[in-house]
Image: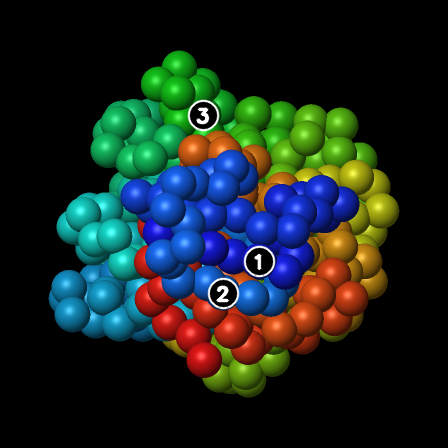
Amino acid sequence: MLHVKGRVLVGPEDVRDELWAVDGRITYERPPGAGELTTLEGWAMPGLVDAHCHVGLDGHGAVDAETSEKQALTDRDAGTLLIRDAGSAADTRWIDDRDDLPKIVRAGRHIARTRRYIRNYAHEIEPGDLVAYVAAEARRSDGWVKLVGDWIDREAGDLTPCWPRGEVEAAITEAHRLGARVTAHCFAEDSLRDLVEAGIDCIEHATGLTEDTIPLFAERGVAIVPTLVNIATFPHLADGGEAKFPRWSAHMRELHARRYDTVRAAYDAGIPIFVGTDAGGSLAHGLVAEEVAELLKAGIPARDALDATAWGAREWLGRPGLVEGAPADLVVYEADPRADVRVLGAPRHVVVNGRVVSGR
């Protein structure tokens, strides 16, 4: 048994004095024999959510189980205990059998247009095969499918949409019929309207949002995961492509320059926003605290930024927080993260399934 006391943030405003973990599950009723247990003190929150993370990938494609484990442990020790794996070429189902690693909601493998994405990452197909591949990934995933909505078109020398409207609408309809939600990687502006009007559930990065498409996202309730720690790399990417693709490079710099304004405009319009780091490609794991800090730089209030990686994010993914009977996945901090989100970067204790797995 485990006893957590101090301040337990069941929700942003629902604060309790203590909880117990018995057989890995949360209870708010003092159990018999509670005198013989481990006690942790501090400010407790549900395990954080990274809603765009890639366990099992590096910059070259799928990695082995040992590397995947190190990635998952890095996220765990940073307080991330629930991951939406937004596309991976690796089979990480074995992680589900480990009671010391984060829980993962998988979106299957990326689905991209032929030669229009990072090599070794995705199923690379043509539009006529999109519905079949979406159906296959919907069946093997944990309720999500990941499309690559736009990417550099070498003939155009810039970002362009990857899929015709008719095919993507049919594919999203099929995913929904099978009970899966659909998200898409999108940097630029031009693919967004078709994807939203086709019924998509979420857009990753969403740097191409404009005053024309923001109202559409808000009206349809389409969520975004901005991955601002990843968008910070755009100038470096632009420098590398300047000689060959000057139009693309200029576009990437423009998207980067307005990134905070874009996210704030989305927030002001009521678009659901969730924390994601895009770890696992070229980015390191364990950056969830940095992404929350980036949302604050964009002008999102601290409690809403916390909600985007805790209570609200878990509800969006259909996973419980610190409620009676839920898995005891929680993080304990020295101070109130609602008052200063910087404490997210220094967990005092990390608890998975009722067991202390890391901390100071």
Query: Within 10 angstroms of label 1, few (less than 14), some, or many (20 or more) residues?
Result: some
Where residue 90 appears, x then y in whole percent?
Answer: 20, 55
Closer to the camera in the image, 81 or 107? 81
Q: Are marks 2 and 3 in contact (CB under 8 Å)?
A: no
Residue 292 occupies quadrant: bottom right
Inspect the image, locate mark 2, and give the three-letter code of the amino acid beneath it: Leu
Residue ID for mark 3: 172
Q: Are marks 3 and 1 in contact (CB under 8 Å)?
A: no
Which comes sooner in the sequence, label 2 or label 3?
A: 2
Where residue 327 appears, x then y in whole percent?
Answer: 39, 42
Residue at 63% x, 60% y is: 6
Q: Are marks 1 and 2 in contact (CB under 8 Å)?
A: yes
Residue at 40% x, 62% y is: 38
Query: Within 10 angstroms of label 2, few (less than 14), some, or many (20 or more) residues?
Result: some
Which comes sooner in the sequence, label 3 or label 1?
A: 1
Inspect the image, locate mark 1, and give the three-letter code of the amino acid beneath it: Lys
Q: Nearer the viewer, mark 3 or mark 1?
A: 1
Tell whether 265 sits left or right of 48. Answer: right
Tell whether 113 sits left or right of 186. Answer: left
Residue ID for mark 2: 40
> Alpha carbon of mark 1 to alpha carbon of mark 2: how far?
6 Å
Picture quarter with the C terminus: bottom left
Residue ID for mark 1: 5
Tell whether 157 sits left or right of 103. Answer: right
Q: Nearer the viewer, mark 2 or mark 3?
A: 2
Secondary-structure class at tag 3: helix
> Alpha carbon of mark 3 to alpha carbon of mark 1: how far?
45 Å
